[in-house]
Image (cartoon, rainbow, N blue to C red):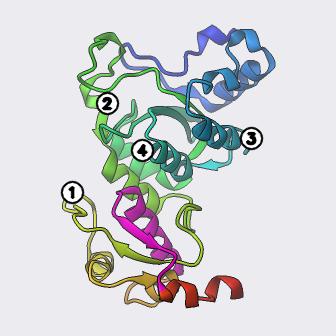
């Protein structure tokens, strides 16, 4: 198998989704033959901190959670293509953090409804695609492959594999919803909507949040992750309630 046959992100037309087994072999070939570009070379143009994150994900043996990698892309503000295993196929999902968009050659409805709870990251690398409006039009994907980033992040946090707090917000802390958080376009209702309204006016620890109506520890952690990914969460580690919270030590 020749490496050039498997361009990881195809900016022209509608890319055919590669089989996961073929893509895994392609990654093994890249790793073994630096002349083909090499995995480490692919991420060398990113910031050192994001490089460290992505190299750590590469070393996870394909077990990285999509929400972790997307959180890293957003935190570092870098355009990254994340190759997600969706059943027997691989979907290249390109994240544009500043534009708050994603490019996905699979229908977003199919991705969310059929694959969201099983998504695994196979590989992450700098994006070749450009966002809509870029002067290099040949490198911009088709309009119907672009989707808002916010709803995907929300669904990924609430329904994806990860059921615990992201490392960036875990530990002894209290949380509050940031002023100006816009949720009108997000699938929020019932107990989650009530919890968000309450967090707009008061802070709460994860332990306290887990006791609120309609929530438990997992659902509370997922909600906090979702709010964080919307840039809508204030995390305080110096608040007296956070300092007094010994739940983490007792777990």
Which of pointers 1 and 3 lies earlier in the amino acid sequence? 3
Residue denoted by label 3? 59
Residue 234 within the segment the image draws in magenta: yes
Residue denoted by label 4? 111
Q: Are marks 2 and 1 in contact (CB under 8 Å)?
A: no
Which of pointers 4 and 3 lies earlier in the amino acid sequence? 3
* Cα gap from disc 1 to disc 4, whole angstroms: 18 Å
x then y, percent, for residue 102: 36, 37
* Marks 1, 4: nearer the viewer: 1
Is 214 located above or below residue 153 in the figure?
below
Which of pointers 2 and 4 lies earlier in the amino acid sequence? 4
Q: Secondary structure at mark 3?
A: loop
Location of the N terminus by quadrant is top right
* Marks 2, 4: nearer the viewer: 2
* Cα gap from disc 2 to disc 3, whole angstroms: 30 Å
Location of the C terminus by quadrant is bottom right
Q: Which mark is residue 185?
A: 1
Q: Are marks 2 and 3 in contact (CB under 8 Å)?
A: no
x then y, percent, for residue 110: 38, 44
């Amino acid at each position: 198998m020749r490496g050039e046959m498997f361009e990881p992100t195809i900016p022209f037309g509608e890319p055919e989704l590669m089989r996961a087994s073929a893509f895994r072999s392609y990654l093994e070939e890249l790793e073994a033959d630096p002349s083909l570009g090499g995995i480490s070379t692919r991420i060398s143009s990113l910031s050192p901190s994001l490089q460290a994150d992505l190299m750590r994900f590469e070393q996870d043996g394909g077990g990285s959670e999509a929400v972790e990698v997307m959180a890293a892309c957003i935190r570092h503000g870098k355009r990254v293509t994340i190759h997600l295993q969706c059943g027997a196929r691989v979907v290249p999902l390109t994240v544009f953090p500043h534009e708050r968009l994603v490019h996905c050659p699979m229908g977003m409805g199919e991705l969310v409804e059929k694959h969201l709870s099983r998504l695994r990251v196979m590989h992450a690398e700098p994006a070749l695609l450009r966002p809509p409006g870029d002067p290099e039009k040949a490198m911009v994907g088709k309009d119907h492959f672009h989707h808002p980033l916010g709803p995907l992040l929300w669904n990924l946090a609430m329904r994806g594999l990860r059921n615990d707090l992201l490392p960036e917000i875990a530990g002894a802390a209290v949380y509050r919803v940031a002023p100006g958080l816009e949720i009108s376009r997000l699938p929020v209702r019932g107990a989650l909507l009530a919890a968000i309204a309450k967090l707009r006016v008061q802070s709460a620890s994860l332990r306290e949040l887990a006791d609120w109506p309609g929530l438990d520890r997992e659902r509370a952690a997922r909600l906090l992750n979702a709010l964080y990914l919307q840039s809508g969460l204030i995390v305080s580690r110096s608040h007296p309630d956070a300092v007094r919270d010994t739940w983490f030590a007792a777990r």
